[in-house]
Image (cartoon, helix red, strand yellow):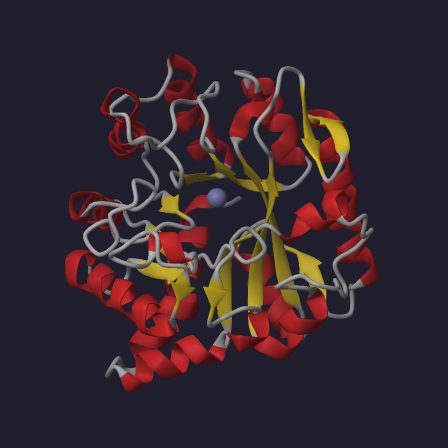
């Protein structure tokens, strides 16, 4: 079945194992060859920034500045689109995705996970937009210029966006960059909900009512997200799926329960896919992109109609892309 997956971390392989494109990546959960076999229509490729230790960070025995790291992953993404051009092309908006499909191609959408490189500057945001960034996950698990992360510490969790973060929401709406609240504090979520004139997304977050991890969304948040026309992409990580967050099994049965909860709480336009492949570990039933059909089969078995499954897989994500990306 055709689908849009709103989060993967596969570009990290450019830094961790030195690949120069993602056509075929040994040991990964996703690459262009397996995407093609999976029936994918579009994949969001995140440039995920590991936590800084001072001015730089260590990854796979190497020291990176944010800029060196960004450039390396960006180059890998561009080379993937160039070398894989018969199968995949970059998409900046929904029209591009549809156009690529008509040409028999999949789409790649480039995103930033942790907006810290924006550095409190709308000017820089514009530069990244011009380089093709179409979604920014405002924070990862540390404070940055936009706001504060999800946390077990209630003081941090209740903190809202920074003054720059608030200003950035309107700018992102106007510019055509999708706003992603996955990883953000609850306070930040409610600020985005109050300020954004366009739909926003939680690209890879689940239901806190079913799995109590603070990265997940409460029912009230799911409701608000739906009310704003946004989507939540289901994350395959065991710790965001199970009632006991120490269990390391990720099963399609659990994925289905979360998706059904999203529909129950926020309606059938809310759920989407945000696998987080290559950013997660554990015993994953869907351990690579080519097994995605296992999820759709499970949903069917659980009584969801073909029409609803198609919305989860594809249409809900496409509609929010239409509303937010230019
Ligand atoms: Zn993430």
Quarter of the rendering containing residue 256:
bottom left
**In the rendering, at what x and y percent does residue 64 appear?**
74, 28
Q: Is residue 93 left or right of residue 78?
A: left
**In the rendering, at what x and y percent does residue 227 appear?**
21, 48
Q: Is residue 261 left or right of residue 272?
A: left
Give the residue at x 61% y 34%: 129
Looking at the image, can residue 314 be seen? yes
**In the rendering, at what x and y percent does residue 86 appear?**
78, 70
Quarter of the rendering containing residue 33:
bottom right
Q: Is residue 184 left or right of residue 60?
A: left
Residue 291 vertical placement versus 140 (above, below): below
Give the residue at x 40% y 65%: 250
Looking at the image, can residue 319 be seen? no
Residue 227 vertical placement versus 264 (above, below): above
Q: Is residue 171 left or right of residue 267?
A: right
Q: What is the number of callouts on the image?
A: 0
Residue 180 vertical placement versus 276 (above, below): above
Residue closest to the far bottom: 301
Q: Nearer the viewer, residue 94 or 25?
A: 25
Residue closest to the far front: 246
**In the rendering, at what x and y percent does residue 34 appear?**
66, 72
Give the residue at x 36% y 21%: 166
């Amino acid at each position: 079945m055709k689908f849009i997956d709103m989060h993967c971390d596969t570009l990290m392989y450019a830094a961790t194992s030195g690949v120069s494109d993602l056509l075929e990546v040994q040991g990964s959960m996703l690459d262009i060859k397996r995407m093609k076999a999976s029936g994918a229509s579009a994949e969001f490729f995140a440039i995920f920034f590991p936590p800084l230790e001072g001015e730089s960070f260590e990854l796979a025995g190497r020291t990176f500045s944010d800029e060196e790291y960004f450039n390396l992953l960006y180059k890998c993404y561009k080379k993937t689109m160039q070398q894989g051009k018969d199968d995949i092309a970059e998409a900046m908006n929904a029209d591009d995705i549809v156009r690529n499909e008509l040409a028999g191609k999949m789409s790649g959408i480039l995103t930033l996970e942790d907006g810290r490189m924006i550095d409190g500057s709308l000017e820089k945001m514009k530069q990244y937009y011009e380089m093709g960034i179409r979604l920014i996950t405002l924070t990862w698990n540390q404070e940055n210029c936009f706001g504060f992360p999800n946390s077990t510490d209630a003081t941090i969790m209740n903190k809202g966006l920074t003054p720059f973060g608030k200003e950035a929401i309107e700018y992102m709406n106007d510019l055509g960059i999708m706003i992603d609240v996955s990883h953000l504090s609850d306070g930040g979520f409610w600020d985005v909900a109050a300020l954004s004139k366009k739909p926003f997304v939680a690209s890879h977050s689940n239901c806190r009512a079913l799995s109590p991890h603070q990265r997940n969304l409460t029912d009230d948040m799911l409701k608000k997200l739906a009310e704003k026309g946004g989507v939540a992409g289901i994350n395959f990580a065991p710790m965001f799926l199970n009632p006991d967050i120490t269990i390391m099994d990720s099963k399609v049965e659990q994925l289905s329960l979360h998706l059904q909860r999203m529909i129950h709480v926020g309606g059938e336009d809310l759920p989407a896919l945000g696998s987080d492949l290559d950013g997660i570990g554990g015993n994953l039933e869907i351990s690579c992109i080519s097994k995605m059909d296992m999820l759709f089969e499970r949903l069917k078995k659980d009584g969801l109609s073909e029409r609803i499954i198609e919305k989860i897989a594809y249409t809900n994500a496409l509609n929010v892309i239409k509303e937010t990306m230019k």
